[in-house]
Amino acid sequence: MARGGRVLIEHACYHIVARGNQKQVIFKENDDFDKFLGIVKMAKKKYTIKIYAYCLMPNHVHLLIDPSDSYEISKFMHWINRGYTAYFNTKYEKVGHLWQGRFRSKPIVKGNYLFHCASYIEMNPMRSGLVEDISKYFWTSYNERCLLGETSRLDDIILDNVPGDTVKVENGDTLKV
């Protein structure tokens, strides 16, 4: 059965999920997490994609991205997945597929839900029981985005003004759009 095409919407963000093949562990050591994040950092420059949130779980990855061109998403993810697979297979003397099929992507409108999606992604380690305090999990963007940690991987979230959103104006007041 043929798979359906991706839903691509211009000026939307995307929640991306990529899983290890057969739910296998894809990050065995801290160096593996670091390597993946380094590849993501290079890919975001190569494809002009903003990253608003991420979470690396032992067997899957969540990214919240804002592409300058929605048609670049597949190239971006292919470059990341191919690069990390080559690293992983060389390091662990493996061959073949690391990722379970193609990545999933869900379009996200740039409204208040964008912040909720970022929080959902970052809280994944707590929901799965890996940690009780999210600030102790180093492979999510929570510390960068919320605790003002090192932010070289993240871009500032800029919302489009969507009816019903509240935005801050120069004098500090809030305004409902």
Image (spheres, grey):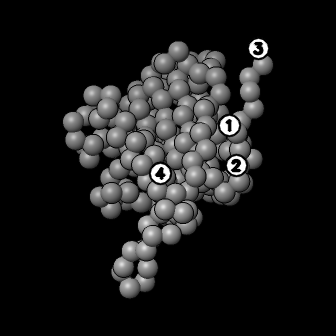
Residue 58 horizontal side relative to residue 46, left or right: left
Where does label 1 land, which residue? 78
Where does label 3 land, which residue? 1
88 w.r.t. 43: above or below: above
**Where residue 158 appears, x then y in whole percent?**
52, 65
Q: What element carries label 4?
A: helix
Where does label 4 land, which residue? 113
In front: mark 3 or mark 4?
4
Q: Given the image, on which type of amino acid does mark 2 rest?
A: Ile
In front: mark 3 or mark 1?
3
The residue positioned farthest toward the left in the image shown: 132
Inspect this view and state whether residue 169 appears: yes
The residue positioned 58% from the left and 52% from the top of the image is 109
Res. 9 mark: 2
The residue positioned 38% from the left and 47% from the top of the image is 119
Check contact, mark 2 vs mark 3: CB within 8 A. Answer: no
Of pointers 3 and 1, the one earlier in the residue sequence: 3
Q: Distance between the residues labelled 3 and 1?
A: 23 Å
33 w.r.t. 156: above or below: above
Task: Sort mark 3 into few (<14), some (14-19) or many (20+) by Cα contacts within 10 Å.
Answer: few
**Where residue 77 appears, x then y in whole percent?**
64, 39
94 w.r.t. 9: above or below: above
Q: Given the image, on which type of amino acid does mark 1 rest?
A: His
